[in-house]
Image (spheres, rainbow, N blue to C red):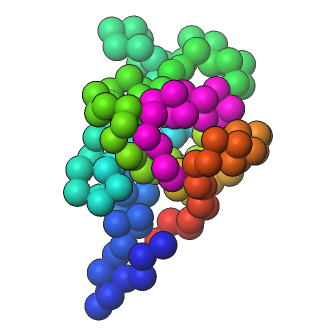
């Protein structure tokens, strides 16, 4: 991770903070998650996403069952919102380690070279999956 100079926050810190701010829009009652997808030079935000119900549906979970509340995941919404071509390299910032299905969605987005996250998810299966396809993963703390 880039070291801050003269008290300047690193880009990694800035985009993880942005993911946390985006997560505040989540309507999920169990867990608020935010995702930011950027270019590798950090000059462009390519997409954002937060977890919640589909557009036009009530801003609440469909069910109270953990892991099956019916909300779209933040990574899923970010992938839907990302219109960058597959060949363009991307960096993903997520408040929480993605679940296995969102890891697969990020892999299929194409061009993802690194995933930064702050908090662990209840399953760490995504770490192995990202390793299999050569996507670097780094956990960093909020500053």
Residue 137 is one of the magenta-drawn residues:
no
User: Residue sitting at 48 percent across and 72 percent down?
Assistant: 1
Which of these two is toward me, 55 or 63? Answer: 55
Residue 103 is one of the magenta-drawn residues:
yes
Q: In this view, does 99 lie to the left or right of 41?
A: right
The quarter holding residue 133 reads top right
Q: In this view, does 126 lie above or below 27?
A: below
The quarter holding residue 70 reads top right
Could you tell me if residue 33 is visible in this image? yes
Residue 104: percent from the left, percent from the top?
A: 60, 29
User: Residue sitting at 61 percent across and 61 percent down?
Assistant: 139
Residue 137: percent from the left, percent from the top?
A: 60, 55
Which of these two is toward me, 4 or 69? Answer: 4
Q: In this view, does 142 lie above or below 29?
A: below
Residue 38: percent from the left, percent from the top?
A: 33, 48
Residue 56: percent from the left, percent from the top?
A: 33, 9
Magenta span dominant secondary structure? helix
User: Residue sitting at 71 percent across and 25 percent down?
Assistant: 66
Q: Is residue 63 left or right of residue 92?
A: right
Q: What stretch is highlighted in magenta?
A: 99-114
Residue furthest top as drawn: 57
Q: Is residue 19 above or below residue 56?
A: below
User: Residue sitting at 51 percent across and 21 percent down?
Assistant: 72
Could you tell me if residue 121 is visible in this image? no
Residue furthest bottom as drawn: 6
């Amino acid at each position: 991770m880039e070291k801050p100079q003269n008290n300047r926050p690193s880009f990694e810190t800035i985009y993880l903070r942005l993911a946390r701010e985006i997560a505040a829009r989540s309507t999920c009652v169990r867990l608020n998650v935010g995702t930011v997808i950027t270019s590798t030079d950090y000059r462009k935000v390519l997409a954002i996403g937060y977890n919640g119900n589909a557009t036009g549906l009530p801003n609440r979970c469909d069910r109270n069952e953990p892991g099956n509340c019916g909300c779209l995941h933040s990574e899923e919404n970010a992938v839907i919102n990302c219109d960058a071509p597959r060949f363009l390299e991307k960096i993903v910032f997520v408040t929480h380690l993605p679940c296995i299905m969102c890891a697969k969605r990020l892999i299929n987005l194409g061009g993802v070279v690194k995933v930064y996250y702050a908090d662990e998810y209840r399953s760490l299966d995504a770490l192995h999956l990202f390793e299999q396809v050569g996507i670097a993963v780094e956990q960093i703390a909020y500053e």
